Amino acid sequence: MGQKVNPTGFRLGVYIDWSSSWFARDSYGKSLLQDFQIRKLLEKTLEKAEVSSVKIEKTGESVRIIINSGRPGMVIGKKGQEIEGLRKELSSLLNLNNIEISVQEIKKPELDAKLVAESIADQLVRRANFKKAMKKAAASAIKSGARGVKIRCAGRLGGAEIARDEWTRIGSIPLHTLRSDIDYALAEAKTKMGIVGVKVWICKGEYQLAKKRSS
């Protein structure tokens, strides 16, 4: 199998839930298009808010959006102005009135693969040394309690003529062990020399399913 299976998709239904939760009664395509529109708008509007994931829940004509962010203050804004403006924009886009938006703070961004990948990509755009950026991110994750970290950067690294890939591995990353809580993300650094892909795997240990159910 190698690296051909997405670690998140591999664990869907085991202990990772779907990022969109709804049942299509009339049109599946219409509901799916709404999801794409919501995510595209949020990605564009909250570009600097360190958004890790967006969960969409639909029941009837109501939509609930849960935003996990490393900077919740930027999403909410002063006295909730930003989040209210975002809600109105989504209402006009989807032609729905009952839209609820909630924001959850990511307490340890060093253990979130999406935020780590985007941080490295941002550094590469600003022409930082890719090896230093990868090693620093991996060391920060291990220091925050990760069992293992694996980072891969691929493209014209350092402005080289020929594209190549570089790896950084620390600790254990058992990708085929389903009980291992592995967070995976992909980010793209759009540099002047071309796009550089950044993949991050972070192992947080074994997922305690029994404890999760009891709580």
Image: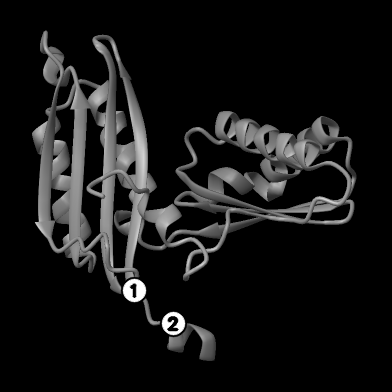
User: Which quarter of the picture shows residue 126?
Assistant: top left
Q: Describe residue 61's horizontal placement relative to residue 175 as left or right.
A: right
Residue 178 or 123: which is nearer the viewer?
178
Q: Element type at marker 2? A: helix
Query: In the image, which disc is placed on residue 209?
Result: 2
Where does residue 25 sit, x and y in percent of width and height?
Answer: 86, 51
Q: Residues within 10 Å of mark 2 (few under 14, many from 20)?
A: few
Residue 24 or 124: which is nearer the viewer?
24
Q: Element type at marker 1? A: loop
Where does residue 214 sit, x and y in percent of width and height?
Answer: 52, 91
Disc with the residue nearer the chain's start (2 vs 1):
1
Q: Which residue, as the protein is rendered here, is positioned at the far bottom?
A: 214
Mark 2 vs 1: CB contact within 8 A:
yes
Picture residue at 65% right of the left edge, 35% below the top: 36
User: Which quarter of the picture shows residue 130?
Assistant: top left
Q: How many marks?
A: 2
Q: Describe residue 204's horizontal placement relative to residue 27 as left or right.
A: left
